[in-house]
Image: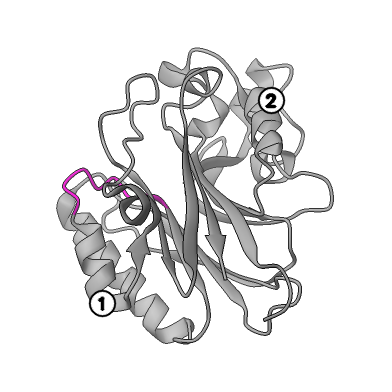
């Protein structure tokens, strides 16, 4: 086996670059601290592609979409626009240290009141003969919606991800009932990084006193050597979600 033998990944709902309850614009701090993590692949949810109202209100609002602003030097990104409003749009993004050879954003909205997407990227990791498939999701708030969205996620993976190619599915599952792991394990042979390493999903919401296990990192064809919850200062003052990181091995 040649090439890169481990990957550091992070999943983070950045709450559109604002602190809990939208008290402060903290996007610049999020950028700094994400850069310090040194992740190879970042799965980001609630990423603003454009918001003209915020740009008028905040003098330090970036002139590019948050997916581009959060990139480190020489990195690559894909953005999936999900929710469109009068002043702009937001969605999911994947930022990668390695080239993104292909990507597609699928609409998995179950009803008109919640716009949800599934962002599937194929990443070319140096030295790997197979593609690395990375799928970023942000599932709905209602259990019935999540059931449909998990079915659509399974269909996508069955159709587009060969069994022999490594796969990471990460994001905000809104799965406080802990149903997703049963479905993804049974249908796709995926396992969750924190559940594998620590025996339980990470508590990730709300960030200042995490109680609910909403955010996940699922893998197939990779091992898990370490996991990390980014809690305490300064992370608790950034988003309303905890950032979760994992080191994955070939």
Dot 1 or dot 2: first in sequence order is 2
Label for residue 28?
2
Do the residues bearing badges 1 and 2 touch, measured as CB atoms within 8 Å? no
Residue 8 in sight from this viewpoint: yes
Instruction: Classify residue 94 by image quadrant.
Output: bottom right
- Where is residue 240? Give x, y as percent: 42, 26
Q: Give the main secondary structure of the magenta stretch.
A: loop
Q: Nearer the viewer, mark 1 or mark 2?
A: 1
Which residues fall within the magenta stretch? 171-178
Task: Describe residue 146's horizontal placement relative to residue 98 as left or right.
Answer: left
Q: Which residue is mark 1?
A: 187
Please tell me which residue is depicted at 28% across the width and 68% down the height of the picture. Answer: 184
- Where is residue 1? Give x, y as percent: 67, 81
Please tell me which residue is depicted at 33% across the width and 31% down the height of the picture. Answer: 205
Circle count: 2
Asked if the magenta segment contains residue 33, the reply would be no
């Amino acid at each position: 086996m040649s090439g890169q033998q481990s990957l550091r990944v992070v999943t983070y709902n950045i709450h559109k670059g604002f602190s809990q309850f939208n008290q402060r614009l903290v996007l610049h701090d999020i950028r700094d601290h994400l850069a310090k993590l040194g992740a190879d692949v970042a799965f980001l949810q609630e990423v603003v592609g454009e918001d003209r109202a915020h740009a008028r209100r905040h003098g330090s609002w970036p002139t590019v979409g948050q997916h581009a602003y959060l990139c480190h030097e020489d990195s690559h990104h894909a953005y999936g626009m999900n929710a469109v409003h009068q002043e702009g749009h937001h969605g999911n993004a994947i930022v990668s240290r390695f080239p993104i050879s292909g990507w597609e954003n699928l609409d998995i909205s179950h009803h008109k009141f919640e716009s949800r997407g599934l962002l599937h990227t194929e990443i070319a990791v140096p030295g790997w003969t197979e593609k690395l498939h990375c799928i970023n999701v942000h599932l709905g708030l209602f259990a019935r919606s999540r059931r449909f969205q998990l079915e659509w996620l399974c269909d996508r993976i069955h159709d587009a991800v060969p069994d022999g190619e490594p796969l990471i599915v990460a994001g905000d599952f809104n799965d406080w009932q802990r149903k997703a792991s049963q479905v993804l394990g049974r249908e796709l042979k995926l396992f969750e990084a924190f559940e594998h390493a620590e025996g339980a999903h990470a508590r990730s919401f709300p960030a200042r006193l995490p109680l609910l296990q909403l955010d996940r990192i699922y893998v197939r064809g990779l091992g898990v050597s370490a996991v990390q919850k980014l809690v305490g200062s300064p992370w608790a003052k950034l988003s309303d979600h905890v950032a979760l990181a994992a080191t994955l091995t070939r």
